[in-house]
Image (cartoon, grey):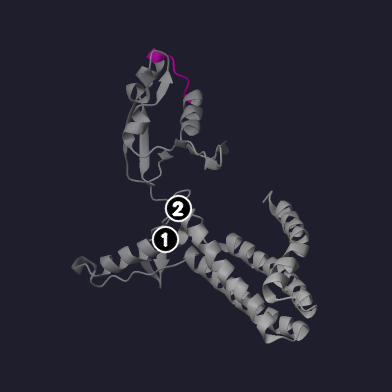
Amino acid sequence: TLYGVEQKEIKIQLLSDRLASHKVDVRNLVNLLMSSNFSLTAGKITDGNKRFSVRPMGEFISVEDYKNIIVGPSNLKLADIAHVSYGQPVLEYGRHLDRKYAIGLDIFKESGANVVEVTDRVLAEIEEIKKNPEMTGISIYEMDNQADGIISSLMELLKSGFLGALLATMVLYFFLRRWATTFMVTLAVPISLLITLACMYFLDVSLNILSMMGLLLAVGMLVDNAVVATESIHRHQEKGEDIEKATVLGVKEISMAITAGTLTSIIVFLPN
């Protein structure tokens, strides 16, 4: 028994007389069928400034895909030595809910699909099913929803980010003692995040736990760089220079150091 991506059971009934006439080894046939149905990542290809992910699609999605497998010389196909069809899975277990018989349906996402999006679509479909008159008296329960854990983790990470931003603002004011400078440094964070999120949206980069942790790390680096830059500008202002000249000189003095420090952190996390 083999399973395709639709999770329907495929029954392959081998014909002994045809196996003998074509001299097909059953063990080699099983290994061939197992290795023919796959889904994996083959790495990345770089073309100029673009980088593409390569993922060979070798998953079977229909009975015809199984029938057309070449299993022997002279283009011998699986359909030539076996009957391939959809079959009713053998019942190997039963489910109970509140001491009554129940039917359980396991729903899995395809590789590369977004768990939260798939869950939302499934729940929306369940709500439509509940409206069906044929479902009167039948209760549908949702159990073991993986999307809940993902959303909960993202919300906790988001709360940590807001709390960190509040604490960072308080610490900045404690050391800088100037509301204007503190406000400038704090304002740099949401502006930079909005630009980053816009780039992520157009580059089709999902907002997940890993990317959000990267954003929080970047916020810390951004605040450090902003404090150093504003402090350098303020030092030139105290020398009597006008605001425009103080800004240019202050940033110019520390730009190389800030760039080198930022690139060093980027290189450290680049292998991830």
Q: Is mark 1 on a helix, strand or loop?
A: helix
For the magenta stretch, what is the residue range?
21-26
Q: Name the residue under label 1.
A: 117
List x then y, in percent, for residue 70. 40, 22
Residue 211 in the magenta stretch? The answer is no
Q: Which residue is drawn at 57% across and 37% down?
A: 46
List x then y, in percent, for residue 96. 41, 66
Q: Can residue 206 be seen in this view?
A: no
Q: Nearer the viewer, residue 260 or 203?
A: 260
Contact between marks 2 and 1 (CB within 8 A): the answer is yes
Up-down: is 1 above or below 118? above
Q: Residue at x 45, y 62 (%)?
A: 116
Quarter that holds the N terminus: top left
Q: Is mark 2 on a helix, strand or loop?
A: loop
Q: Residue at x 59, y 60 (%)?
A: 211
List x then y, in percent, for residue 133. 19, 69
Decide if residue 260 is on the left or right side of residue 128. Answer: right
Q: Nearer the viewer, residue 163 or 85?
A: 163
Q: Which of 268 and 154 is in front in this view?
A: 268
Crowding at mark 1 (Cα within 10 Å: few <14, some 14-19, many 20+)? few
